[in-house]
Amino acid sequence: MSRVGRKPVLVPDAVKVTIQSDKVVVEGPKGKLFAAIPKGVVVRLEDKQLLVEAPDATRGNRGYQGTMRAILANMVEGVSKGYEGAVEISGVGYKAEMRGTDTVRFLLGYTEPRDVKLAPSLKVVVDKSQTTVVVSGPDKQVVFQTLAKMRGLKKAEPYKGKGVKYRGETIRRKAGKAGSK
């Protein structure tokens, strides 16, 4: 059996879980999330704990059991506390700005600005200096996928460190050309 899949997911008082035949709905103060239940996996709610089981324990079902348990744990944490991440921009003239409520525009040294569309569940804040973008929301996958999209526009390069990096990420710096002696 899966070790991860056997651990129960504790459901806080502020979170409401509804289990239907093919999906699980988790509602809380931060939002509402859905997840499809894969075939071969059973989800039960007992005493404010979500239990994930694989009745016929084939290799695939055990894998789905652990995956489903991790997804449910992320959903419960997301609707109760939420997830947050940030990217930092460094380089002369590089900046980010909000365009309306659903787009972040990046100026990263290209001839055209780069736009990133946002999911409706996300809350994005660009700081005053326009060099830090903070993304928060209830869905872990959506938050960190959006951050990865932003970082992918122009990854920080190793010589001067110009570009977009995650908050707290360290860029290994390289020495430039030695030049003639």
Image (cartoon, rainbow, N blue to C red):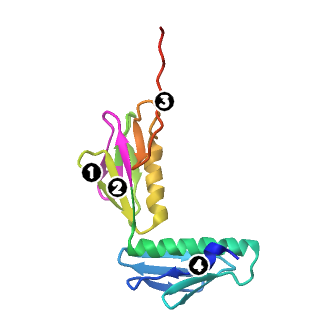
Quadrant of res 135 = bottom left
Label 1 element class = loop
Which numbered circle lies on residue 7? 4
Spatial separation of the CA atoms under disc 2 and disc 1? 8 Å
Numbered circles on residues, count: 4
Residue named by callout 3 = 174
Residue named by callout 2 = 134
Three-letter amino acid code at the position of disc 4: Lys
Spatial separation of the CA atoms under disc 4 and disc 1? 40 Å
First in sequence: mark 4 vs mark 3: 4
Residue named by callout 1 = 127
Q: Can you name the residue that lies furthest to the bottom here?
A: 47
Where is residue 55? Give x, y as percent. Answer: 71, 84
Where is residue 52? Give x, y as percent. Answer: 61, 81
Magenta-drawn stretch, dominant element (helix, strand or loop): strand
Three-letter amino acid code at the position of disc 2: Val
Residue shown at 64%/76% (left/top)? 38
Residue shown at 39%/75% (left/top)? 80
Q: As rendered, which of 38 and 2 lies closer to the eye?
A: 2
Instruction: Check contact, mark 2 vs mark 1: CB within 8 A.
Output: yes
Q: Is residue 163 magenta?
A: no
Three-letter amino acid code at the position of disc 3: Lys
First in sequence: mark 4 vs mark 1: 4
* Tag nearer the camera, 2 or 4: 4
Quadrant of res 42 = bottom right
Label 4 element class = loop
Q: Which residue range is magenta in the image?
A: 86-104
Left or right of 157, for residue 39: right
Q: Residues within 10 Å of mark 4 (few under 14, many from 20)?
A: some
* Tag nearer the camera, 3 or 1: 3
